[in-house]
Image (cartoon, coloured by chain):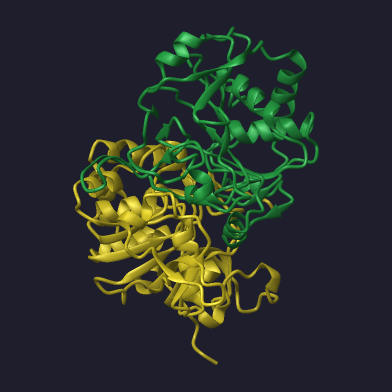
Amino acid sequence: MPEPSYTWAEMMAISISHEMQDGDFGSVGAASHIPAAALRLAQLTHAPNLSFFCGGSGAMNPKIQRLTESSADYRNLVTSEYHFSLDDVVDFETAMRFDFAFLGGMQIDKHGNLNMAMIGDWDKPKVRGPGTIGLIFLGGFKTSYIYTEHHSPKIFVDKVDFISGAGWLDGGDARGKVFRPESDGPRRVFTPLGVFDFEPESKRMRLIKVHPWTSVAKIQAATGFELLIADDLQIVEAPDEHELDLLRTQVDREGVLRRYPSAA
Amino acid sequence: MSASKVTTPEEAVAGIPDGATIALGGVHSHNGPMALVNALIRRGVKDLELIPTPSAGPPVDMLIAAGCVRRLHVSYVGLEFLGMAPNYRRAAESKAIEIVEADEAWIVYGFRAGASRLPFLPLPALYEGTDLPKVNDGIRTTTDPYTGNTVTTIPALRADYGLFHAQVTDRKGNAQIFGQRRFEDVMAKASDHVVISSDEILDEYAPAPDPRLVSIPGAIVESVAHAPYGSHPLSSPGHYGYDREQLVEYRDLAAQDRTKEYLEKYVYSVDDHLGYLDKLGARRLLGLQQTFR
């Protein structure tokens, strides 16, 4: 468990911000305030030329000072540089103009394939999901970041029941045979427990960073397939005061991330 | 000069027949044409084919609960920060409604094609590698006549009626929609009949509105329903925020399969949109106001 001085949501936002690259241009989905906070924090620290737009609203580079529970909130839009239309969104997605996108799923498999459509058979679903929305554009982003607020064996499955968004497909070079060469598969997976990449040969999910309140064994137990573990595995330290202060005073003034439950 | 297009929400949807295909505006908890949706539910219209925006929410779930829907194009249907859409989920799992397994590209490119009456649009490799083509036979392939390569195609989407909520509209139907920008215009162009609900109607003596703010041109709008708080309990950007308390009430009842109680309280027990506003009361409605001007 995190120390009472910060929550796992704040840690996750800080962990994500560290992985963002200056100059990149990408997108976050609706109801994604942790990545949105992370991107804004990255702009205020090491990546001033990072650009992002918020799905659901079309707000480009909102000067977020308080996180809204709906990214389509008008208060988010009016602080932005530009309002994307949906036409812009699909144009940039299809034309491979986005360096990255944050995406999630109700199932995520060991090769980073995502499912938002249903659990079970399509003809007889056990759970009908909300739908595929923009996930086919995993085939049009230069890379993608997978993000989930829940790390459990129900979400991290060996193989998704339905592919809404193609990650590395069956691994190896499977993806390269299907999509345009400029579009790479997922680069990172962010969860409350840690950070993962995909091993370059097999394209299997690999643990690279462990958050302070958990362990390799606990993360493996919460994952429905065998994880690869990086040779240079890092144990993440508690966020430094400067970053936490920036997050709280410049990005999340109303403490949305501070109100997250302390249990990851 | 044509007569004023301004009418009531009830009159504006009176001509929508059972079985109609409806393009439905609104994104997540914002800008839903709720006064029009409530009027459709009150009328008991049936067998609608719904094509909402790619980020659909409460109005779709309510229309399903009220038994108005036969077929639904799904990109995202949910209650955003309040979780799954319970009636949509139950109806889809039990096959009470037909699901077109779709996504953002299907709806945006489909309406783009429909707006120009193009037959279909070709796409580069995107659906390949996903399971959507296996369950949606509208996603097909053809040969690009210029390169000889295989391309994926999706069909044009058109609707009989397009229903959209605007903040300010003049009597000719020039509609200003704030918030998520200008996809409603594409959907409107792909609709045979365009119906706008509008919080405010410009007085005929008002100065001409700034044309840069108009999202849907009046020339393609058939009627304008004057509907103050016409997007409630969703937000109307720049005018009022969403009514979180009522959305939670909806979500909690819907999750317990008690949506009928919600519809009885807010839709069936009142005669019209003004009756709905009476029921909510000035105190509640004015408390939602958000002014940015």
Residue B217 image-quadrant placement: bottom right
Residue B214 image-quadrant placement: bottom right
The x and y percentages for residue B265 are 28, 47
Q: Which chain is green?
A: A
Residue pictured at 48% horizontal, 35% vertical: A112
Is residue A227 visible to the viewer in this orientation of the structure? yes
Q: Is residue A195 left or right of residue A237?
A: left
Foreground: A20 or B69? A20
Residue pictured at 60% horizontal, 48% vertical: A183
The x and y percentages for residue A224 are 37, 22
Q: How many marks?
A: 0
What is the residue that sits farthest to the bottom in this orientation? B1
The x and y percentages for residue B24 are 42, 63
Is residue B293 visible to the viewer in this orientation of the structure? no
Residue pictured at 46% horizontal, 45% vertical: A165
Foreground: B23 or B129? B129
Q: Is residue A208 above or below residue A58?
A: above
The x and y percentages for residue A18 are 70, 26
Quadrant occupied by the C terminus of chain B: bottom right
Q: Is residue A44 left or right of residue B13?
A: right
Q: Is residue B99 left or right of residue B159?
A: left
Tell me the colour chain B is drawn in.
yellow
